[in-house]
Image (cartoon, helix red, strand yellow):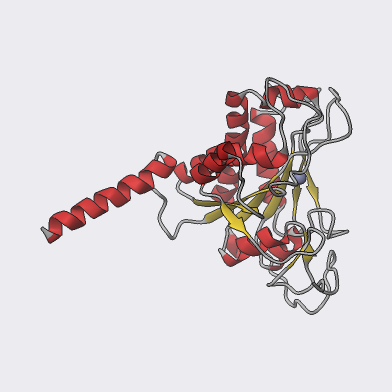
Amino acid sequence: MARDFLCLAATLLLAACTAVSGAPAPPATAPLVVLDIGHRIGSEGAGAPRAVNGKRLSETSFWYEYAYYTKQEIQAAGYRCIVCNRGDAPSNPRLQEFARRAGVVQLHQKQKEGRYASTIHPDRYAAGQISADFAIRQGAACVVFLHHNGLNGWSTRGENAMILHNRYNGAQLAACLCRAVNEEILNHGMDNKGKACVPAVRYHASAPSAGWMNACDDSGIPAAVTEVAYLSNANHVSFLTVDANARKYAVAIAHGIIDFLKSYNPHTRHIRANDHIPDEGSNGKTIKY
Ligand SMILES: [Zn+2]
């Protein structure tokens, strides 16, 4: 009886693990990828000027819907993956369902004007700092901040599609993400007038410009921000409002991450020697609440 019960419990556990990703859950020792949904519910970053194909895209709601496919692909390759987002859970039932499906971890911390002070590296604060700190505490092998870009009004030109990365640890991750996006999405369905996605390092002007990645650098974690699709570009939007295309895009991001993890040697990582000696991109102090 006890043995039957254990078997049943094990079967149920396996079923539960399998149900989430469609494949057995990766082992607890597998490298961990943290995917952060950019911005927050109620302040969703870039948005399309109007609805296309019945859908008005915004950065945050797009990734609530599609980060699940990125996660699924990463887990199928044998890596662990957590999706997080700062701020409150969505109240919209549709987004709630997406959040449940992707297992989104909602992150909360006191903030000032949309910025969070790092609780790990005292001279770092930024909008995405809360997520960077979460990835560091989870011991992530890498972290990818899922965003889109946007300019004023509509355009159809080739945009400056970029993968931003942290200075010391993120170049290889960004190169892998660019390659995947260029081979599978950009100018392969998502027209960008032949213009490719390129890596761009970020560490100056730390607070407004993805500076939260500096804290990942301090802890030796490769970090990247996806700024590939422009929600102001009619060609990008008409591509991404088709569900199958959006899934393909989310999976391409996973392919870049998987490629990176396969070739990455964590022993080569750069860790900041001393948090008390200001580094480039340092705010020099924390923020007072
Ligand atoms: Zn953004």
**Residue 188 image offset from top left, x and y in percent:** 68, 23
Quarter of the image holding residue 160?
A: top right
Seen from the viewer's position, the closer of residues 104 and 271 is 104
Residue at horizontal 82 percent and vertical 71 percent from the top: 287
Rendered-image quadrant of the C terminus? bottom right
User: Where is residue 271, by image quadrant?
Assistant: bottom right
Is 93 on the left-hand or right-hand side of 196? Answer: left
At x 74%, y 39%, the residue is 148
Residue 255 seen = no
- Indicate which quadrant contains ligand 1: top right
Could you say where residue 81 lies in the image, as x and y percent from the top left?
52, 51
Q: Residue at x 68, y 47 (%)?
A: 41
Q: Is residue 170 above or below residue 53?
A: below
Q: Quadrant of the N terminus?
A: bottom left
Marks counted in the figure total 0
Left or right: 237, with 136 as reference point: right
Above-or-below relation of 12 to 140: above
Q: Residue at x 88, y 29 (%)?
A: 153
Q: Residue furthest left?
A: 1
Q: Is residue 225 above or below residue 159?
A: below
The percent position of residue 82, horizontal first and vertical second, equals 54, 52
Residue 164's x, y, as percent? Answer: 76, 48
Nearer to me, 179 or 37: 37
Q: Is residue 230 visible?
A: yes
